Image (cartoon, rainbow, N blue to C red):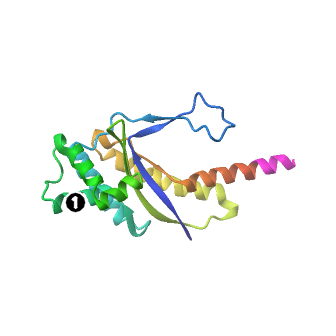
Amino acid sequence: TGQFRIKLIYGIKGLDRSDIYPMDPTMVGEVVWDYTFNLAEKASQERMLEMCSQLLTNPKVKDGIIQCFMRDFKNWCDQNEYRFPVTPSLFDERLKEFLGSPVGKFHANSHSVGYVNNHLSYAQLEFITEFEEIDPEAYNSNWKSQWQQWENFMKEMNKNSPAGLSNGFQSSDYWQYLVTRHALELNSFWGVI
């Protein structure tokens, strides 16, 4: 078996690649923001903390190690005698204060949360998972099965989340690698024919 990182991302819908030249790898497109994303609501804060707990107990998460800024934010609130979940009107102020703390700086520097134009625009949870060795004979169905397991997990997370936290998606460099590898193998085959 091997391992790879997966990120659960909130606040981003995708990329608009309509105005780019597809053969230029430096052009990635423009971020399309999910304007329904809202962590200030108490229900969203509680739900993200619950997701962290679910990941901690998920047998596919390697050693139960996850990068969960909300768990650290809650602990920081408790240490500073702030109530958690934080009242929506105080959330942004408290989160920025947390991001200035030593633990918070780690999350700010690793892009666990991000502000754009002084507005909380995205958040992510990150963890390492193990993957099954991919049988070359069943390569295409194997990696798609692993990808589908995490897609189903995200659908379940989104389904049980408040509106401000219901459009998350999962992403991994590993999926990109596997899709690219598959395309290269197919095209090399067709190049020989």
Point out the residue furthest to the top here. Answer: 19
Residue 44 percent across, percent down from the top left? 26, 46
> Total marks drawn?
1
Is residue 192 covered in magenta?
Answer: yes
Q: Secondary structure at mark 1?
A: helix
Q: Which residue shows up at 60% across the image and 59% down it?
A: 142
Can you identify the residue that label 1 sits on?
Answer: 76
| Residue at horizontal 17 percent and vertical 40 percent from the top | 89
- Location of the N terminus by quadrant is bottom right
Q: Quadrant of residue 143?
A: bottom right
- Residue 111: give x, y in percent of width and height: 41, 51
What residue is at 41 percent from the left and 68 percent from the top?
59
The answer to whether residue 118 is left or right of residue 143 is: left
Query: Quadrant of the rendered structure where residue 98 is?
Result: bottom left
Q: Report the magenta stretch's main SS.
A: helix
Place of residue 103 in the rendered image (x, y in percent of width and height, measured from the top left): 31, 61
Above-or-below relation of 74 to 88: below
Q: Position of residue 110 (x, y in %)?
A: 42, 55
Q: Nearer the viewer, residue 90 or 145?
A: 90
**Range of the magenta residues?**
187-193
The single residue placed furthest to the right in the displayed view is: 193
Of residues 122 and 53, the one nearer the viewer is: 122
Compared to residue 154, the image places residue 20 above or below, namely above
Mark 1 crowdedness (10 Å alpha carbons): few <14, some 14-19, many ≥20: many
Q: Is residue 189 magenta?
A: yes
Name which residue type carries label 1: Trp
Q: Residue at x 58, y 28 (%)?
A: 18
